[in-house]
Image (cartoon, rainbow, N blue to C red):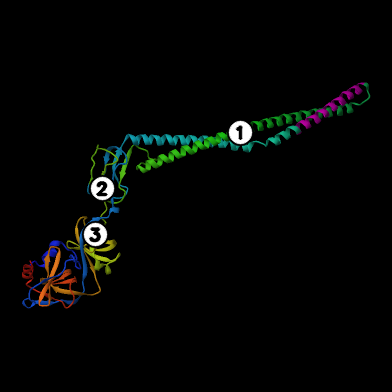
Amino acid sequence: MIFLLAVLTALGLGYYWGHQPGPAAIPAISTPAPASRLELVKVTRQKVQGEVVAVGNLTTDPDRESRIGSPIAGRVSEINRSVGDRVEGGAPLAVITSPEITKLVAEHHHAELRYQQALASQAQSAQAIRLGDEARRPLEESRTEVISSRTELEVRRSSRKLSEQNLRRAQGLYKLGVVSARELEVANAEYTQARDREQQSRALSELALQHRSREQDIASNQAVIGPKLNALNTELKLAQEEVRHLDVIMRNLGLDPEAGGTGLVLRAPRPGTVVERSVTLGQAVNAEQELFRIVDTKALWLWVFLQEDDLGVIRVGSTAQLEAGSRKFPGRVSYLSPLLDPETRTLKARIVVDNPEGQLNAGQFARAMFSVKQARSVLRVPLDSVVIEGTSSVVFRAKGDGVERAVIEVGPQHEDWIEVRKGLQEGDQIAARGQAALEQQRR
């Protein structure tokens, strides 16, 4: 007789509350053997207080794993890290040089120069317009000033002519002795004053004409400067957009637009340990190659399979104690699959365990234990009463004067007895020994 303990170990069952499902469709087969010749035991119930145990291998968190390559083709000009090095986020790993990088840096530099030139031209034109706006007088006002100055000049000219006639008449009468020298001096003074006023009005009139001419020129120039300024604004925006576009390209490649340079520095995207390096100094690389692999093992995952019956006591957030070798670590369930395997009636679960000191390794075998506070009432049978046939567990149940073969579903093992989940009822009597002979007889 093949004992269940050896078979469970061979099958690698890692559950304390695990089960071994059998093909429920196999019918019980009556065996014509008198039950009186067999040692029979009764199926009983017993309360158990225990824990759920599941096993698996530790794996890395994919979100904590980085694979680094060069975004463009080039040649490795510098290597900064080797396998086993611990790196922080942003740490340099290697430097890639490429003609594409040199060309891109030059284009960015030229774009910046065009932007600066466009900015200066736009500022100069805007300044000219602003100064013109501040200095010029309205054109209509200058035209009014011309008219006013001309009118005043005509009045002053008439006044000067009249005073000139009066002076000549006074000079004639003075020669004849009709007017006194005093009257001649008064006439001369009036003429001089009228002449000076006429000259002043003429100067003001000429200034008014100059003002009007300047306002006309400014108005004409404004018609030219306005569109020119608009063109300069458009040119400035295009140059600015070109610089911004090249900035984005360079930053996406890992280049610093402000620093320039001709080398692309590959950096670690997050902290971790370099576990793979597939590049050497001077090697030509392309954009499809993986050059470095960095893994952060400060938190690991343990994937296990839970029995359907365990779902009543294990949920997302449930805590577990993980055993890896002789060491124990706390863990927490972070995911339960929404899909139950229809054949094994098991569910995939993920347990997260912190590993800040690096005592655990990815790929390491570990066992997770969940404490169960509530006692369970289970059916129990002797371990020796169960026969393993392939993937099925079989007992021989008393029926009338004989026995029948019954396929059962078993649960965890407890020393010399084992739990029965399906296939038997409390009070059933089964063969405790002699099953091998019954099986041979059945065949």
Q: Is residue 119 above or below residue 419?
A: above
- The residue indicated by pointer 3 is 302
Amino acid of disc 2: Arg
Amino acid of disc 3: Leu
Q: Is residue 129 above or below residue 296?
A: above
**Tags 1 and 3 in contact by the CB under 8 Å rule?**
no
Q: Is residue 127 above or below residue 12?
A: above
- The residue indicated by pointer 1 is 223
Q: CA distance from mark 1 to mark 2?
A: 64 Å
Q: Which residues are magenta?
A: 148-175
Q: Which mark is residue 437?
A: none
Q: Is residue 174 left or right of residue 413?
A: right
Does the rendering let one see residue 113? yes
Q: CA distance from mark 2 to mark 3?
A: 21 Å
* Residue 163 on the magenta segment: yes
Q: How many marks?
A: 3
Q: Quadrant of the N terminus?
A: bottom left
Name the residue rendered at 62%, 38% in the picture: 133
Does the rendering let one see residue 359? no
Dominant secondary structure of the residues highlighted in magenta in the image: helix
* Residue 240 on the magenta segment: no
